[in-house]
Amino acid sequence: MKQRSIRVRLLAFGAVAVLGLAACGGGNDAADEAATDDATEETVAEEVVTGVGNDCTAGKTLVEGKLTIGTGNPAYEPWVVGDAPESKEGFEAAVAYGVAAEMGFSDENVVWVRTGFDEAIQPGAKNFDFNLQQFSITEERKANVTFSDPYYSTNQALVGFADSPVATATKVSELKDSEIQRIQTMYQEKLTRVLEDIRVVSEERDRLQQEYSERVKEARGVERAACRVEAEEAVRVLEKEREVLAGKCA
C-alpha cells in the first residue's frame, strides 16, 4: 500500500508539534478539567482573533506568527488545483489549511514556498515548516527526514487495454509475459522481485523512445513495400509501352 505523508521539517517543530496538537487541545488532564468555561472560551477567542498559532507552535516555526508550507514547483492536480495552493483548492491544499487552522493559524498567516521533490527530502536546512508533495514513506527517507502519520493511502493497480491479458488477470503469475510500465515511482524493484521475467520500462522517455523506434521501423517497412509496389507498377507500364511501340514499328 502506498502511503502519502506530510513531510515535516526536522529542526523547526517537526512531527512532534503536529502530533502534539492533542496535548494542547485535549481536555482530559486534571488541570484542563479545573479550568473554567470562561477561560477556555477566552483562549479560543484569542486564537481565532490573532491567528498566529497556538501555544504548541510558539517559537517553533521559521517565522514567528507564520506557518510556512512547502509544495511542488509546479504543484500538480488533483493535489493542488491550478498550481495555486493559496486557493485552498485541491486535496493537499485543503489538508494544509486544515492543519494550519488546527494549529491556530489564520489563512493570511499561511506562507507557501516551492521546492523540488528530491530537494525536500534531502538532509539539511529547509525553507519550510512542513512540506506536502505526495511523499511515499520509506525507511531510506526516514533516515533523512521526519514524516507525519500518512494522510492518504492507496492500493496499486495495473491499467491496460480491455483486450489485453492484464485486464483479466487475477494472479500475479498471469502477468509474467506482460510488459509493465511504471512512471516515476519507487515500485520497480518490488515488481522485478515478484515477476522475475518481467521487463520494466523504467522511464517514460525510454518507453517513448522505444515506441518511436518501433514506429519508425514500421513506417520504413511500409515505405519499402510501397516502393516495391510502385516499382512493379512502373515496370508493367513500361512493358505495355514497349509492346505498343513494337506494334507500331512492325
Image (cartoon, grey):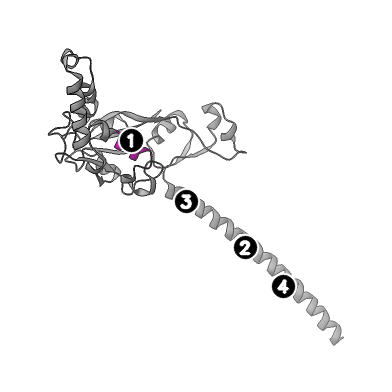
Q: Gap between marks 1 and 3, in whole Å? A: 35 Å
* Residue at numbered disc 3: 208
Q: CA distance from mark 4 to mark 2?
A: 15 Å
In the image, which disc is placed on residue 234?
Answer: 4
What is the C-alpha distance between the residues marked 1 and 2?
58 Å
- First reached walking from the N terminus: tag 1 or tag 4: 1
The image quadrant where one finds the N terminus is top left
Camera-near label (1 vs 2) is 1
Q: Nearer the viewer, mark 1 or mark 4?
A: 1
- Mark 3 vs mark 4, foreground winner is 3
Q: Which residue is mark 2?
A: 224
Viewed as shown, does residue 236 lie left or right of 72? right
Task: Give the mark nearer the N terminus: 4 vs 2.
Answer: 2
- How far apart are labels 3 and 4 at the CA level? 38 Å
Please name the residue shown 83% across and 81% down the image.
244
Main structural element of the magenta stretch: helix, strand or loop?
A: helix
Instruction: Say which of marks 3 and 2 sits in front.
Output: 3
Mark 2: which amino acid?
Arg
Q: Residue furthest front?
A: 38
Could you tell me which secondary element the residue under label 2 belongs to? helix
Q: Is residue 36 left or right of residue 83?
A: left
Amino acid type, mark 4: Ala
**Residue 95: assigned label:** 1
Residue 93 is drawn in which quadrant? top left
Q: Earlier in the sequence, mark 3 or mark 2?
A: 3
- Determine the secondary structure under disc 3: helix
Q: Amino acid at mark 1?
A: Val
Residue extent of the magenta highlight:
89-98
